[in-house]
Image: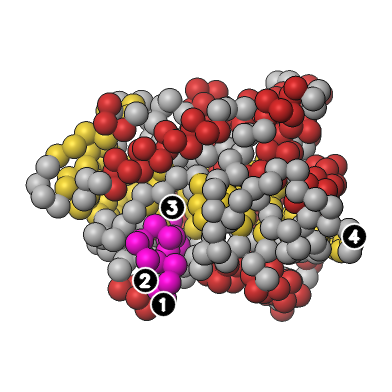
Amino acid sequence: MELKAMPIRIILFITRNSATGSHALQCSDVEPCLPGTSALKRKACGMDAHTQYHHALLEALNPARGRPLLIRGELAQAESMHLLEAIARKDYGAVPVQLLYIDPLHDAEVVRNGDFLEIDTMYDGLRALYREVVTQRGAMLRLTGSQHPDLESQLAAELPEAHQRWMKAQSALAELYRDHGINKGRCTWLVAGAAVDGWARKVYPNEGDRAQERLWQALYQMTQVDAGQLHQQLQRRCHALNSLGIDRFSVQGPGTDWTVGLQPLARFRSGGSHTTDGRFFQANLPSFEVWVTPDRSRADGEVTFTLPFLANGVLVEGLKVRMQAGAVVECQATRGLEEFKRHIAMDESARYGGEFALVGIDSPVHRLNTLFYSTLYDENAACHWAFGSGYADCLEGGQGMSPAQLQELGCNASKIHTDAMWGSEQINVTAFTRDGREVPVLVEGAWQSDFL
């Protein structure tokens, strides 16, 4: 599950106070308002695919009437941000709606030519804003996709120390929202894509001027599923896994011989969640995974990561690690190794894991056979492991626990949460239960019959 870093430099800040309007969807406080449930109605009234997609994002986020909403994205995504704002005001009564524009070229200028004090404090002004959203139980929507997809890699190569300080400043800000908003169940949140030309040309380098339209079509395709059916399927998988009483998983495949342990209170979750006041939302769109928080001290063996992934915006490829008592103790990679090492040295817990996620080869993203250079999409193509922070809501009663209690139960706490994909059609995953059973879960990447 992608927890997109909340870090942003405010270049333009817009707050408008306007009439709230009325709910078009009439969602209850306790029943799921699932993404895509109104797709047929929207199509029947002639709504185009682009507008349908943005409506689906708001349905997934489910912002509350009269509570603040933050929409964050790059300057190149302004059209999508404006459309989302209009839908949020009219259909959900969100107020105030605040648009935060990221200017990656400005951020790069600060990293290249600012002093370390400016880099270390460049997000301090956002803390009060984030605190307000958390306090008022609001909502946050982050658009992923960059007009300058290689910029962070260039900065890491040119100025590794300044780049690392920039990453730490971002992570410290993300920690505030994650620890006090997400892990406490106070806010709804969503990470979703909005196609821009730079990102599209990275994904489809041979498409030229057609690349952005092709990327939009891929985004539409990945969200045009029967949301109710998908939700039920993922819930069945979670229930089946949680009812087993799993002590540990064994993962076997080329270059992988790995064991991951769970606490007895660990619970698998899927795309849909509820806040503590009963609001249903989906944090990632699309989402074809089920995930759990592992015991931070019970990951052992070797694992080979099968897809490239981003660490601090730098592509890491061909990564293989050895874990002992939960921590990475050895690693090698064909690309991005030094940046990965810096990344898992962000704090003392970054070498440990916070998420063990299962994705079958039935995933629509897997079937596209496309590297999107975006964690949100690439993690939905394959099973993955997150280095760094775990999820309190994947432990029974976890949202009401103190940090000390979570730590005692093996829930890792770190400034980072970075997903890396290890799944493939050659991977086998077996669950070992606390009462001594051995249950195949994925065989050659495919869900077994008990989990369909």
Q: Nearer the viewer, mark 2 or mark 4?
A: 4
Asked if residue 389 lies in the magenta stretch, the reply is yes
x, y percent for residue 44:
75, 22
122 and 361: which is toward the camera: 361
Discs 4, 3 touching: Cβ within 8 Å? no
| Residue of label 1 | 402
Measure the C-alpha gap from mark 4 to mark 3.
40 Å
Residue drawn where x is 22% and y is 45% of the image: 244
Local crowd size for mark 4, using a 10 Å CA cut-off: few (<14), some (14–19), many (≥20): few
Q: Is residue 34 left or right of residue 149?
A: left
| Residue of label 4 | 18
Residue drawn where x is 55% and y is 33% of the image: 227
Q: Is residue 377 left or right of residue 291?
A: right
| Residue of label 2 | 406
| Residue of label 3 | 386
Q: Is 284 rendered above or below residue 343?
A: above
x, y percent for residue 448:
28, 28
Type of residue at label 3?
A: Ala
Discs 2, 1 touching: Cβ within 8 Å? yes
Q: Report the span colored magenta.
A: 384-403
Local crowd size for mark 2, using a 10 Å CA cut-off: few (<14), some (14–19), many (≥20): many
Type of residue at label 4?
A: Ser
- Under circle 2, the secondary element is helix
